[in-house]
Amino acid sequence: MPSPPDLSRRIAAPTIIAAVKPAKIFFAIAFTALLTPPAHAQHCPVPAAAGRAVVDPDAPLQLRAGRMVSEDRDTVTLHGDAELRQGPRKFTADHITYNREKREVNAAGGVTVRSAAGDILRADEARVELHNFTGEAAAVNYAAGGGTGRGRASHAELRGRGVLVLEDAAYTQCPPGNDDVVLTAAQITLDAESGFGVAKHAKLRFKNVPVFYLPRLSFPISDRRKSGFLFPSAGYDGDSGLVVEAPLYLNLHPSADATVTPAVHTARGAQLALEARYLVPGGGGELHGAGLPNDDALQQRDRWAVDYRHRHRFTDHLQGALDYRDVSDNFYLGDFADGIAASSATTLPASAELKYDDGRWRARAGTAAYTVVDNNVAADDFPYDKRPYIQLSGHSGTTLGALRTEYGVHTSLVHFKRGHGTEGRRLRARPALHFPLRGRGGFLIPALSLDYTRYHIDDGGDGSGQTLSRTVPLFSVDGALVFERGAGRFVHTLEPRVFYVLAKNKTQDGLPLFDTSKVRGDNYEQLFRDNLFFGGDRIGDANRISLGVESRLLAGDGAQVFRAAIGQMFHLRRPRVGLSPGDSAGRRSGLLGEAGFTKGAWRGGAFAVWNSADDRLRGGRLRLGVESDAGNGAEVGYHFRRAADADSEDGAVRQWRLRAWRQLSARWRVTVDEWYSVEHSRNAYADLAFTYDNCCWGITVRGRQRLSADGDSRNSLLASFRLRRFWRYNRAQ
């Protein structure tokens, strides 16, 4: 179960977005990321909130100077490289005068005042009362303890308890030596105890150019969250027109917050987006939503999307999950989704589930529904909702002499519903016995199981219906040997494996197909399944044997350096059970082979299926990647699948993927992500981004190409600007 959201993290820095159309990304551009010499990223200092140090007002003073003069009983004057200390507090100056009766320090000439919290004031002159640390200073340069801010002022007033008031002041949270983003104001009050500052008649300057003015501004000087407007954004998009956003952050509670973003799209209309997060004892959740009424670009239709997720742990064994996703129309994801996975989704799931697991018994109960968001999906191919479903599994074992017996059962009850077609309930129970023999040199596992399935098919909604059942016994034997030998500093293994399964043929053409599909055979382990169907509506008849051999190269610590496997499935009797009447199957599967390696920064893998019937490659995939310790890397992959009909290209896939992430210099970084469809000779998705970051502000220029729901390419060029450190949880007051 995913962890609940961490509300201690900061909201992502706001951006200013501009989009220009069109843009196109090619592999030649992507390979520039691969060929660029590596560079190390800069390490930005992380501000740490300074804690308050308690100082005993009666703590002794330590005095040091080139010359010390006591003018009277209560006054001491220090001349030349003067220093006065009281615990963590420290004063240095050309001249320091201390009055014992008033407990007051007066300093002049190159004054430096260090507070107990680590704050530093540098001034021409200063006066401070030690018992409450109040006073004033002139011509001040200021640096907060923990690196949370620094600034300057013509005059400063210390008001005790970590409060500093700066007149005619400037303030920045950029690292020392970088004054690109500076807040100037007639007066700035910094309150270390509350963690916030207040500026009057404030101007935010970027590169010494005023960006905006506010008569009063409250801003954070620590990592504490605060309600307020985030940096507004404005830009242009080819489909949406001019876009203006003004995000508002709401610190609702220590365990809850939200960001509300009103926006105006000149080509679409007004939009309102929401991101909310919360924590409760035992769990937490997130809500993302957006609404755009009367979209001018889509026939004045109301557009909206919602994504809600909650995770909860009631006890050590009982957990719960709630997920809900929905959109207003089938074009929404193509118009607004970010990333190939989101924009190419065909269904949106919604589910609620309780799960119990004590190590021996596992139970799940819930409901699941699916919204189809792809116009190309035929109505007969819509997935069935499961409203509700219950699953119960248990396992245990016993040892009688040298014989180990493991027994278990898996049961499920599901009500399948859909807007049309066959609906009904399915009860399935599968008890099983295993007699494992395991050792260092291999294993042998005979198994017996009985798969019982009973259907009640609804008919007309009047409670009547048809009852069907199926009982299939299965017997299987899974065995493997493990041979090892030394290979230098590695261990080389050879692991032949044999799997046999026998299952009675039961006619199942009259049974419904609620959630079942045929195993695709796209990995080595699928050769050793006792059922060649996923789901519970078909149990394949079997009299088959699977042969395979696996070889691994293991390092001294047991880490796998290289692995290769090859295998094939042979039917001693031609299978008769299919997804539908007339389905045919050959006497043997394709020859499967896969391999993978990890060597230092390099990693790779390959898989292929060779069709023995027509001596053709049926499908495969290839992946090769490298990533350095500096975080630079690249990965290239190829996915291939031949169409089921040799005379048609329907269902064929030939697709390249290239990913690269490279630090061009200490401040510049490039990332590439491209999916290229060979059969369509165009990008399914492509993203190329250059990012500049100097620890104070940053800019990203991104070119993107993606396919929309209607099959057209959407091209854009985006530029985003962000103030990396200063603008966080701000509020105008």
Image (spheres, grey):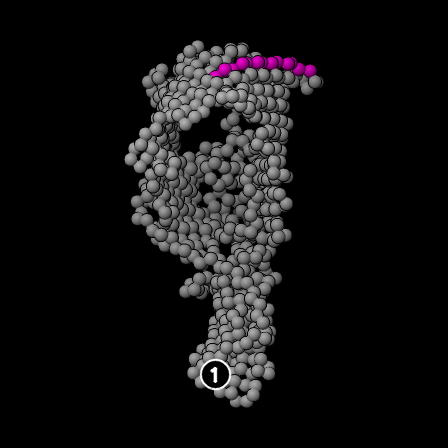
Q: Quadrant of the C terminus?
A: bottom right
Q: Is residue 474 magenta?
A: yes
Which sits in the foreground, 432 or 666?
Answer: 432
- Prevalent SS, magenta region: strand
Q: Is residue 672 above or below residue 353?
A: below
Give the magenta range: 464-476
Which sits in the foreground, 462 or 98?
Answer: 98
Query: What residue appears at the point 50 percent right and 40 percent down from the top-left corner?
Result: 337
Dot 1: within a 10 Å radius of its alpha carbon, few (fewer than 14), some, or many (20 or more) residues?
A: many
Query: What residue appears at the point 58 percent right and 59 percent down from the top-left corner?
Result: 731
Q: Is residue 280 above or below residue 163?
A: above
The reply to whether residue 518 is in sight is no
Q: Quadrant of the N terminus?
A: top right
| Among the 4 quarters of the image, the one containing residue 360 | top right
Q: Is residue 661 magenta?
A: no
Query: What residue appears at the point 56 percent right and 88 percent down from the top-left corner?
Result: 73
Which sits in the foreground, 653 or 480?
Answer: 480
Query: What residue appears at the point 46 percent right and 53 percent down from the top-left corner?
Result: 721
Position in image of residue 196 (x %, y %): 57, 62
Position in image of residue 470 (x %, y %): 58, 13
Q: Which kind of residue does numbered mark 1 sit on? A: Leu
Q: Is residue 41 above or below residue 542?
A: below
> In the displayed structure, does residue 149 sit left or right of residue 493?
right
Q: Residue furthest left?
A: 488
Q: Residue furthest front?
A: 401
Q: Is residue 484 above or below residue 454?
A: below
**Which residue is labeled 1 in the image?**
78
- Badge 1 marks a residue whose secondary structure is strand
Position in image of residue 179 (x %, y %): 44, 64
